[in-house]
Image (spheres, rainbow, N blue to C red):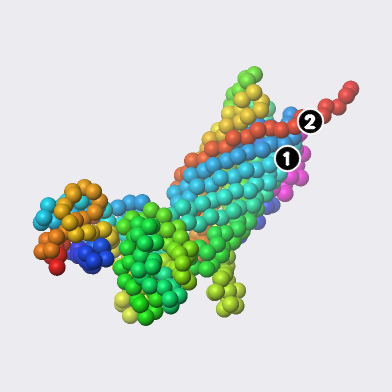
């Protein structure tokens, strides 16, 4: 059957995260391959994008980490506001900031040089460590193993009037966001979300 | 391990045989070291996941030795390894038609990547291989010579990683795993004016095997069974002194 969903949407942080699970769980994208999607809003924006594997790199090439994401820790005197500009500077956005633990979770909107961009965070003032976000814990005997066929794509969103084709999804309150995805192997799926 | 031993035996056998004073390096797709005792080569190759650059110095006559250094970089993983290699080989003429049989043995130690995937871990690779090649001079004119060379080698690769940085305090000695693979290569050497040689070629790692999940016991940056293109530019240096009659 497969599934497609908008797993995360926050106009405040500027992130919409799309997750798709192909019906064929043996499906694997190779390095650099992607599955095209189309995103539209009821207010008139239209963006072409593509889904990539949720976990990188391709099998048997390195330790697995979550594509498009990394996290970092800071000294206790560092606020998210002070690193926000650095995150934006590498083309990312802070998805979550744990103020009590001083840990930030960053989403990047493309896979180009993900590791080196994450590594650059080591030079930000007050940053104590950086790591590529690991996949969730997976134990075969508990049956919670992650599905390696899962695809994902974060899309940058902002409030405003639509500019189709500019790579950023402009949304307005009350908009319906629709993602259309052609499954590998056939069949079209769509997911919708209403902007609060 | 058995094929490595067989290859070493073959190399020893061929080494013991009478080697005519000719044409070392023909099997590497490069001109003989007959006139020029040294050769400097710069090479580049593109793999599925990485690009490799290297320089090497070759010396010898009937038997040659090549010392090489390079860098193989996987840009997606922001990771580089630096191989230091030594290859010893010989070109043994088969008949009188410019055909050569070429045993070779090589070893390489590659340093890095360090802080791989921001995991505070460093890697080192040790790669030993024995092989056999066949080469032929297919054209020889005054200003241009063309050589064709192919080889197959069996390699044993040990990958080791160990913790660094804050992880090093754990006293973890690291982990080594050994895999093996075969490497086939085919190249064409085009020598111009008996000085500069351009050598395009392809290589294919095949029968790549390693213990489960020990991906680091396979060739860095390469995908099993990929056909990758490489090119080398080589310059012969020096002149052999000739005996006065």
Q: Chain of mark 1?
A: B
Q: Residue furthest right?
A: B245
- For label 1, the residue is B59
Q: Chain of mark 2?
A: B
Mark 2 lies on a secondary structure that is loop
Assess whether residue A103 is covered by the magenta stretch. no
Above or below for A87 versus B183 = below
Residue A57 point in image, percent of width and height: 40, 60
Q: Which residues are magenta?
A: B10-21
Assess whether residue B14 is covered by the magenta stretch. yes
Residue A26 occupies quadrant: bottom left
Residue B233 occupies quadrant: top right
Above or below for A122 versus B152 = below
In the rendered structure, the answer to whether residue A28 lies left or right of residue B228 reads left
Question: How many other residues sit within 10 Å of disc 2, few (<14), some (14-19) or many (≥20)?
Answer: few
In the rendered structure, the answer to whether residue A130 lies left or right of residue B139 reads left
At x 57% / y 41%, what residue is drawn?
B43
Residue B225 - label: none
At x 53% / y 47%, what residue is drawn?
B52
Mark 1 lies on a secondary structure that is strand
**Pointer 1 and pointer 2 on the same chain:** yes
Above or below for A10 versus B62 = below
């Amino acid at each position: 059957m497969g599934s497609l969903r908008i797993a995360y949407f926050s106009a405040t942080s500027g992130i919409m995260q799309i997750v798709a699970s192909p019906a064929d769980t043996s499906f694997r994208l190779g390095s650099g391959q992607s599955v095209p999607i189309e995103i539209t809003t009821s207010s008139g924006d239209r963006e072409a994008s593509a889904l990539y594997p949720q976990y990188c790199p391709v099998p048997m090439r390195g330790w697995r980490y979550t594509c498009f994401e990394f996290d970092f820790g800071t000294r206790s005197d560092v606020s998210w506001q002070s690193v926000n500009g650095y995150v934006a500077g590498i083309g990312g956005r802070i998805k979550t900031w744990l103020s009590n633990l001083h840990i930030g979770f960053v989403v990047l909107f493309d896979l180009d040089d993900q590791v080196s961009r994450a590594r650059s965070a080591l030079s930000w003032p007050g940053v104590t460590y950086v790591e590529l976000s690991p996949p969730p814990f997976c134990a075969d005997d508990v049956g919670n193993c992650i599905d390696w066929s899962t695809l994902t794509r974060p899309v940058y969103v902002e409030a405003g009037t639509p500019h189709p084709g500019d790579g950023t999804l402009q949304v307005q309150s009350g908009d319906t966001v629709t993602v259309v995805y052609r499954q590998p192997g056939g069949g079209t799926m769509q997911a919708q979300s209403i902007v609060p | 391990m058995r094929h490595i031993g067989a290859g070493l035996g073959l190399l020893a056998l061929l080494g013991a045989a009478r080697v005519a004073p000719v044409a070392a390096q023909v099997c590497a797709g490069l001109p003989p070291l007959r006139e020029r005792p040294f050769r400097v080569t710069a090479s580049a190759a593109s793999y599925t996941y990485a690009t490799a650059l290297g320089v090497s110095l070759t010396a010898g006559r009937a038997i040659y030795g090549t010392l090489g250094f390079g860098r193989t970089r996987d840009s997606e993983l922001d990771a580089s390894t630096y191989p230091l290699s030594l290859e010893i080989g010989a070109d043994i003429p088969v008949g009188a038609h410019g055909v050569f049989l070429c045993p070779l043995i090589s070893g390489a130690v590659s340093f890095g990547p360090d802080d791989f995937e921001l995991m505070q871990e460093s890697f080192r690779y040790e790669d030993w291989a024995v092989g056999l090649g066949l080469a032929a001079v297919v054209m020889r004119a005054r200003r241009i010579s063309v050589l064709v060379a192919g080889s197959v080698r069996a390699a044993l690769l040990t990958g080791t990683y160990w913790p660094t940085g804050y992880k090093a305090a754990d006293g973890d000695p690291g982990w080594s795993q050994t895999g093996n693979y075969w490497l086939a290569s085919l190249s064409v050497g085009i020598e111009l004016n008996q000085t500069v040689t351009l050598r395009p070629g392809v290589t294919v790692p095949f029968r790549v095997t390693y213990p489960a999940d020990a991906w680091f016991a396979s060739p860095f940056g390469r995908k099993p069974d990929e056909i990758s293109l490489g090119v080398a530019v080589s310059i012969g240096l020096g002149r052999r002194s000739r005996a006065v009659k």
